[in-house]
Amino acid sequence: MAEHGAVSSVLLRMSGAWPLSTAAREFASAGVPVFPCVAYGKRPATGHGFHDATTDLDQVQAWWRQSPGANIGVPTGAASEVVVVDLDVHGPVDGRTSFDRAMRAGLVDGWELLVRTPTGGLHAYYPATPGTEQRSWQAGRAGIDFRGDGGYIIVPPSTRSIQGTTVGYQVETINTRPAGLLDSNALRDFLDPRPAPRPRPETWQPAGRDDAQRLAAWLDRQDTDRNLKLFWASCRLAEGGVPLNDALDAVLTAAKSDFGPREITATVRSAYRTVRGEPARHGPSSPPVRGASPQVEDGWFRRDASAATGTSRVRGL
């Protein structure tokens, strides 16, 4: 269990009478980088946003001397060692309901404190997990955003202008027990589960060196369209990195009398030129392949002994 961090420690001792400049200086003195945001708003008032956050007291004082009403921004994640679960309340979306569900599931225990936001939502503060990147994310349908690495929050005593009324960020509830680390990935998966990946259809696998002999055995069993099938299968061998000579040797060894060496050599070479991006010379012995692969009843692409003997059905040739 982790103890309360620097951000929460400053908020716990904060007086309601602190001006924004004093609060900003207190955060910086405690080692929490801060940066100014526009008065009554959330937009950063510096050129690089939260990337400009600093603990340099001279810079912090200069910023709030120039803009005394600037709200206080704090980068979340490793920079400040705090992460925040942001519960939004907008129309039919109520993040508090989602947070309650996550609480019952034991996923959001251990927050340090809860801060009421001007729009009626809540910020739940947690210590950042040491040595682990916790990227910010949004679960819009659940009404919850996670502010971690790559994000920032506005902290008390900052204020917002809501329909002409000034409303402040206020600490609402303090957890006096030791704080716990938040598994932000588990929370995201709970709030916004990702669909299970669809199983991939069985297709041919890239060929390897041992498939040259399997190709030869398969071709030896074909009676029709062997030239077209040889060209297509030779392309797969080339894509799998089988040397051209290996493919030629295997096929020529198993060639039938009506499927001569010149025809075989021309077709295999044409396939290899095509795969390697070289222009292939199409002719009677090297037909171009268009569309789907030739359909056969058994296949040499299976990686088992039955494929070479023709006792199993084809997977993808």
Image (cartoon, rainbow, N blue to C red):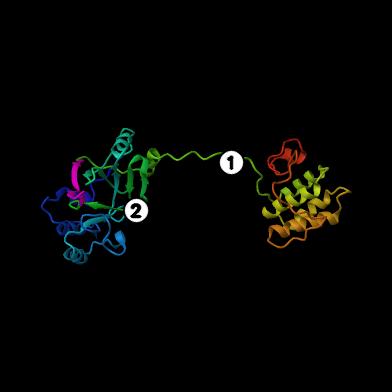
> Is 165 included in the stretch rendered in magenta?
yes
Q: Which of marks 2 and 1 is in front?
A: 1
Callout 2 touching callout 1 (CB < 8 Å): no
Q: Is residue 229 left or right of residue 175?
A: right
> Which residue is rendered at x = 23% and y = 61% of the image?
55
Which element carries disc 2, helix, strand or loop? loop
> Which residue is rendered at x = 14% and y = 58% of the image?
22
The image shows residue 221 at horizontal and vertical percentages of 81, 42
The image shows residue 121 at horizontal and vertical percentages of 25, 43
> Which residue is rendered at x = 71% and y = 51% of the image?
290
Residue placed under numbered mark 2 in the picture: 149
> Which residue is rendered at x = 47% and y = 39% of the image?
195
Magenta stretch, residue numbers: 160-175
Vertical position of residue 58 compared to residue 172: above or below: below
Vertical position of residue 194 compared to residue 286: above or below: above
Residue placed under numbered mark 1 in the picture: 200
Precedes in sequence: disc 2 or disc 1: 2
The image shows residue 234 at horizontal and vertical percentages of 74, 52
Q: Quadrant of the N terminus?
A: top left
- The amino acid type, in three-letter code, at marker 2 is Asp
Q: In which quarter of the image is the C terminus?
A: top right
Q: Distance between the residues labelled 2 and 1?
A: 34 Å
